[in-house]
Amino acid sequence: MAADDQPDEVEQPDQDPTSDADVSNDDGGPPAATDADADTDADGELERLRRENERLRAEVDQDLEAQDRRRSRRRRAVLATVCLVVGSLLLPVSVMTIWTRNLLLDTDRYVATVEPLASNPEVQAAVSARVSAKVSELVDVKTLAQEALPENAQFLAVPIAAGADNLINEATTRVVRSDQFQTAWVEANRAGHDGLVAALTGRDGKLVSTEDGKVVLKLGAVVQQVLARVDDRFGIDISSKVPADKIDVDFVLVESKQLADAQSAIRLLEKLAWASIILAVGFLLASVLILSDRRKGLLRAGIGIILGMVLLRVGFSLGRELFLTNLPSGVQRPDVMAILWDTLTRFVLQAVRTIFAVGAVLVIGAWLVGPSGAAVKVRSTWDRALGSGGTAAGSAVDLGPVPAWVARHLTGVRVAIVAAAVLLLLWWNQPTGKVVLFIALGTLVPLAIAQLLASAVRRDEGEGSGPEDPDSDGGDAAEGPASSPAPAGA
């Protein structure tokens, strides 16, 4: 039996490893080594499973983080869109309220607005007709002539009275077309500027009053000038015979049934004037900062600004049409009302064009730095043209350390140039759309100079280093090919 058992002992290693544990209890020979191998395999398997578990857990964490990032991006995109829409809608409102406060409630701005009306032929004709009618109503020329003429010349009173109306019209027209009238117009509007405040707040001023949906300018001073000229023409003292409280003439600037409602709305908007512009700019700025892609945010903000100004411009066109269509039946000169509308709104429309130009500059700038093929081609053309010019300038003229400094700080230089352009626009008094475009195009000049200087540094650092990005500091190039001798014919 012992001889038969020996082969079984030899064949033990070929059996299932799980039986080694039982055999290892019989003696301490080879089975002990097999037990150590089993422990090593088990440890290896546990380590493999541990690594696999860590890998799967890492993948799950990455998936969860990716989902969180996607959800965060979606939330940020939605929030940015909401801010963009709110800011774009608030911008026209803020323009209206700032125009109301700075134009209609500022004496100098108001006078500058209405001053051209005094030299407008249609307005002069309307004022002349109104003043002439008032003078003819107040003055009984025949009676006054009879009182002034001697007894043997009383027969002249009738022809004098017959020609009085023509003479009054002629005198009034000359007064209205004179420089004195323009001066009187400006002074009346300046002194009565509180009447425009009355138009917004519903209270009466000294020279301007609001009543029954009307904004009325009082032209008593003009009547006095006409009477004085009639006195000079006839050689009689008419003006002293007309009571002072009878010579005032009301000239209706605005007549609208909706004025009372507009007064309530304007009072509210006037209180919210600065708040509205701060909110509008804040929402638009937030729509840019919330997005991770700032360039895309600027592009969207520019489009929002443009759409807001287009909306406001369309609103003014519709408002003008409604205003002229719904004039009261008593208005005899609708053309004068159209001139009045255009005059009073010209500054706000100028502001609309200016802000529209700002939006257009933002859109074009954001597009130029974008990834589209056309934008890349434009930038490449710019870089090649200025790069060649800068290289030629660097080889022809020793520019000292300036090109190297500009190349190292090119991004900062560009930011400083753009910031200076923005400050110039903010400093400019009443900028127009043309001013915005002029500043935008003028900004390209220092940007081009900075690019030329950055390109000139290539010659200063050695021709063997090859072309390099002007935005980099050239450190990598100095460690590589620049350390080897340049070819003789380079």
Image: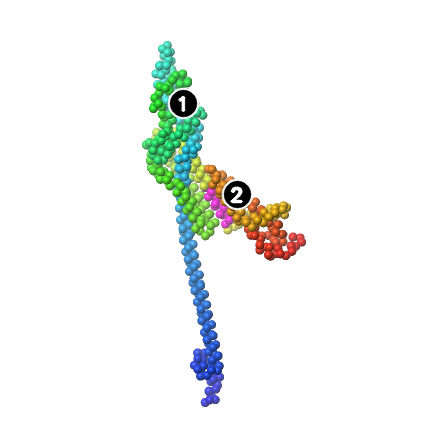
Q: Is residue 86 above or below residue 168?
A: below
Query: Mark 2: few, some, or many residues within 10 Å (few <14, many ≥20)?
Result: some
Q: Residue at x 54, y 49 (%)?
A: 409
Q: Secondary structure at mark 1?
A: helix
Residue found farthest to the left: 212
Horizontally, is 124 left or right of 398 in the view?
A: left
Q: Is residue 148 above or below residue 327?
A: above
Residue found farthest to the front: 401
Query: Mark 1: few, some, or many residues within 10 Å (few <14, many ≥20)?
Result: some
Q: What's the amino acid at mark 2?
A: Thr
User: Would residue 377 be counted in the magenta stretch?
Assistant: no
Horizontally, is 82 left or right of 416 in the view?
A: left
User: Would residue 366 be counted in the magenta stretch?
Assistant: yes
Q: Position of residue 76 (x, y in %)?
A: 42, 52
Could you tell which of marks 1 and 2 lies nearer the N-terminus?
Answer: 1
- The residue that disc 2 covers is 443
Residue found farthest to the top: 152
Quadrant in the picture for residue 60:
bottom left
Q: How far apart are the two marked residues, 1 and 2, measured between alpha carbons?
A: 54 Å
Q: Which mark is residue 488?
A: none
Q: Secondary structure at mark 2?
A: helix
Give the overall secondary structure of the magenta segment: helix
Q: Position of residue 72 (x, y in %)?
A: 42, 55
Q: What's the amino acid at mark 1?
A: Gln
- The residue that disc 1 covers is 225
Horizontally, is 476 left or right of 101 in the view?
A: right
In this orientation, which residue lies closer to the viewer: 424 or 82? 424
In this orientation, which residue lies closer to the viewer: 438 or 314? 438
In this orientation, which residue lies closer to the viewer: 120 or 397? 397
Highlighted magenta segment, given as a residue range: 356-370
